[in-house]
Image: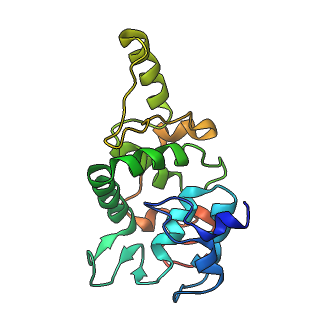
Amino acid sequence: MTDSSIMHPAEQLFLDISIHDVLTKRLPFVEPWATMYVDSIREQRYGDAIWARSLIFGGTEDGVITEEWPNPDITVLDNLRENAVEAKTNEPGFYARALEFYAKTNSTDGHPEVIKIIFETDGVKPGEREAEEDVDEEEEGEESEEGEDGEQAEVGELGELNDLDDLEVLDDPEKDGNCCAHNQSTNKP
C-alpha cells in the first residue's frame, strides 16, 4: 500500500474511512476495531475490515447495533444486507466496482460471510459472474453488460474463497464464538 493510497478510502461503499483518518484519529474510533480495520485492509482481509468498520464507532452489543440511528436493534449482518441492497439500487457503478474489489479478498479472511452477503445481493455467487459473462459474450458476440455509468460490471475470480457456497451466514452471533480471532458475543478480539 502506498502512502497516497492511505489518504482515500479503500473502497467507497463498505470501507469508506481512509486508513489515514483512522491512524490520525480524526474521529472517535473504538479499539480494537480501529487497529483491526487498518490491518485487515492492508492484508486484503476485506470481510474482516468490513466487520471492523461496522464496530469501529462502538454502539454494538452481542452483534446487535444498539444505537438509535439508522436502525436500532438490527444485527451487524442484517445491517450489511440492507446497505448492500441500497448500494446496488442507488449506486450501481460503485457497487459493480465493489464486487470487483472484494473478489480479491485474501483467503485468510476471518469473515467470509460478509463478502458472501455482498455478492449474494447481486444475485450471483462469488466467482460465477465471470463465467456467466463468458457465456453471454459467446452467445451475443462481443457485447458486455454495462452499469448505468457505462463502466464494465465485471468481477474476476474470487480465487481462494470459491468455497463460500458452503458457508453458513450467521444471523445469530452467539453461534460463532471464535470468528476472526474475536468473540462476537462480547465484541472483543
Question: Would residue 168 be seen by someone viewing this image from the given angle?
Answer: no
Identify which residue, 60 or 17, lies in the foreground. Answer: 17
Look at the picture and state if 22 lies above or below 133. below
Q: So how many labels did they put on this image?
A: 0
Left/right of residue 186 with respect to residue 81 in the rendered view: right
In this image, 118 relative to 33: left or right? left
Task: Give how far across and how far down residue 75 sits, in percent.
Answer: 34, 68
Q: Could you say where residue 167 lies in the image, as x and y percent from the top left?
A: 48, 45
| Residue in the picture at 43% in, 66% down | 173
Colouring mode (rainbow / by chain / secondary structure / one colour): rainbow
- Note whether 142 is above or below 45 in the view shown: above
Q: Can residue 41 be seen in this view?
A: yes
Q: Name the residue at the front extreme.
A: 150
Residue drawn 33% across and 60% down? 83
- For the C terminus, the quadrant is bottom right
Residue 4 drawn at (x, y percent) = 68, 66
**Placement of 79 over or under 100, stated as above or below:** below
Q: Residue at 62% across / 54% down in the picture?
A: 109
For the point 62% across and 36% down, the residue is 159
The image quarter in which residue 152 lies:
top left
| 141, 43: nearer the viewer | 141
The outermost residue toward the right is 2
* Quarter occupied by the N terminus: bottom right
Query: Residue 151: image x %, image y %?
Result: 42, 39
From the viewer's perspective, is 89 left or right of 42? Answer: left
User: 11 above or below 121?
Assistant: below
